[in-house]
Amino acid sequence: MPHMPRVLALDTATQACTVALSGEAVTARHELLARAHNRHILRMVSELLLGRSLTDAVDVIACGVGPGSFTGLRVAVSVAQGLAWSQGLPVHGFCSLTAQVYAAADQQLLRDGDWVLSAIDAQIDQLYGLWGLWRHGRFEPRSDAFISTPEHLPVITGAKDAVIVGSAAHYVERFPEGHQVGHRYHPQITPDAGVMVQVLGTDALPLELGPAHGLSPQYVQRDIGWKKVSEQGRHD
């Protein structure tokens, strides 16, 4: 494998259908396609390959595993698994909430030392969230990914003036008292595969390679009826 692996990244955890490929240059496609990811993602990947085979263009397939839209996560993980399995390529799963933070940083929306709440609207009067610090060009999570109502948002001492990135920023007026003012809000931020292929494999986000069957969505609820491709078809 080359010193800097060529990474094909994709994420469909939000309304954004985003794919990118690193190599001599970064090529990317990023479209807002709510509830239509499955109809477009393979076409977008094909556009990046420019007629090349996966093995000629890609060393690693990186996939946003959520949390996020149930259907969206299944699309991304299924596509990543299928592509990786077909050519024996390794995979890397990354947190979609973390990807939003790096997308915000790429747009110069974060300052060193900022507390950040990355939050995705769960569309059920709840949000998926992740707290962390932006320091020295990298994101340092300070919580596990969670789901909550806006009123019961887990809060962190010292994070009163946090930057909120992601589609759930519109819930801010319903956040617990003391966490409703003094923020910078960026609801337009989504995961961006073009940013991720530049960050993955660096000191900020080392690649952790595994087999395709080890990739699975990151759900923060319980009792989700998802099975990995390797488990489908089994009858216990």
Image (cartoon, grey):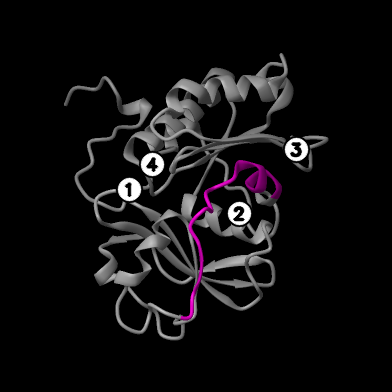
Asked whether 187 falls inside the magenta stretch, the response is yes
Q: Earlier in the sequence, mark 2 or mark 3?
A: 3
Q: Earlier in the sequence, mark 4 or mark 3?
A: 3
The residue under label 2 is 103
The residue under label 4 is 217
Which is more toward the observer, 213 or 100?
100
Q: How far from the left and from the top, in percent, is residue 105? A: 64, 61
Q: CA distance from mark 2 to mark 3?
A: 15 Å
Disc 1 marks a residue whose amino acid type is Tyr
Task: For marks 4 and 3, give the one nearer the viewer.
Answer: 3
Q: CA distance from mark 1 to mark 2?
A: 21 Å
| Secondary element at tag 2 | helix
Q: Quadrant of residue 120?
A: bottom left
The residue under label 1 is 219
Q: How far from the left and from the top, in percent, is residue 164? A: 48, 66
Q: Earlier in the sequence, mark 1 or mark 2?
A: 2
Q: Which residues are magenta?
A: 182-198
Disc 4 marks a residue whose amino acid type is Pro
Mark 4 Cα shell of 10 Å, populated few (<14), some (14-19), many (≥20): many
Residue sticking out furthest to the top: 51
